[in-house]
Image (cartoon, rainbow, N blue to C red):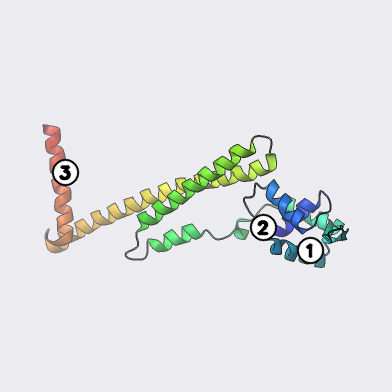
Amino acid sequence: MSVKHSLLAVLAGGDRYGYQLRAEFEERTGATWPLNIGQVYTTLSRLERDGFVEPAGQDAQNHVFYRITEAGREELLSWFARPVARAERPRDELAVKLALAVTVEGIDVAGIVHAQRKHALAALQDYTRVKARLGGEELAAGLVVESMIFQCEAEIRWLDHVEARVLRHVRAGAGAGAGAGEAARGGSGRGGQVGRAQGASAVGSSEGKRI
């Protein structure tokens, strides 16, 4: 998320001081990305340095207001016109975690998937409640909350896919191990045990059909 451009977007509607900027940003986005006030003022300083905003006086409580400059408006319009490049998005920690988990011996991958799915379902419920509170009139905040809902739903579907794929991989590995064990040890050992278990299952299945 670009804090710089988010503040410029709020300032495009009129002069604001730091706390007003934070409050209005969070209102427009459904408070899905809370801003630290220190981050707001640090960003304002950088925007002023770059010529995108300028001081616009103080009120009776000594709040310093900021105004967007013409250069700031041009920068904001340029940001709106640019697509968000995937390379600029943060790395997917969950995908990396699972990719590493399947390569480390002794890691309970199914447990990781289960815990993450539980977390995603809880988040989905939270965002759904927020959407219900917003109602249909809050277009700006509603769009952000709906985006979070879709992301949670997509994550849950992907976790289901991961679980199924890992299970297929384990089953395929067990089958390959059984065949290798039979060939190398003449039906003895772990591979032979897997092979015999599969054979017994097949026999039982065929007997069941005959019955």
Judged from the image, the secondary structure of the residue bearing numbered disc 1 is helix
Q: Which residue is found at the position 47% from the left and 46% from the top?
A: 121
Indicate the position of residue 72 as horizontal and vertical percent values.
Answer: 82, 57
Q: Amino acid at mark 3?
A: Ala
Q: Amino acid at mark 1?
A: Leu
Image quarter of residue 71: bottom right
Alpha carbons under labels 1 and 3: distance apart = 71 Å
Residue lying at 41% horizontally and 53% vertically, measured from the top left: 115
> Which residue is identified by label 1?
47
Query: Marks 3 and 1: in contact by CB < 8 Å?
Result: no
Residue to which mark 2 is pinned: 35
- In this view, the mark in front (2 or 1): 2
Quadrant for the N terminus in the image = bottom right
Q: CA distance from mark 2 to mark 1?
A: 16 Å
Q: Residue 86, position in %: x, y? A: 60, 56
Residue at the image point whose x is 81% and y is 48% from the top? 13
Residue 102 visible here = yes
Q: Is residue 44 left or right of residue 188?
A: right
**In the rendered image, which residue does mark 3 sit on?**
202
Q: Amino acid at mark 2?
A: Leu
* Side of 98 relative to 43 (left or right): left
Q: Is residue 192 above or below residue 207?
A: below
Which of labels 2 and 3 is toward the front? 2
Q: Is residue 78 visible?
A: no
Contact (Cβ within 8 Å) of mark 2 with mark 3: no
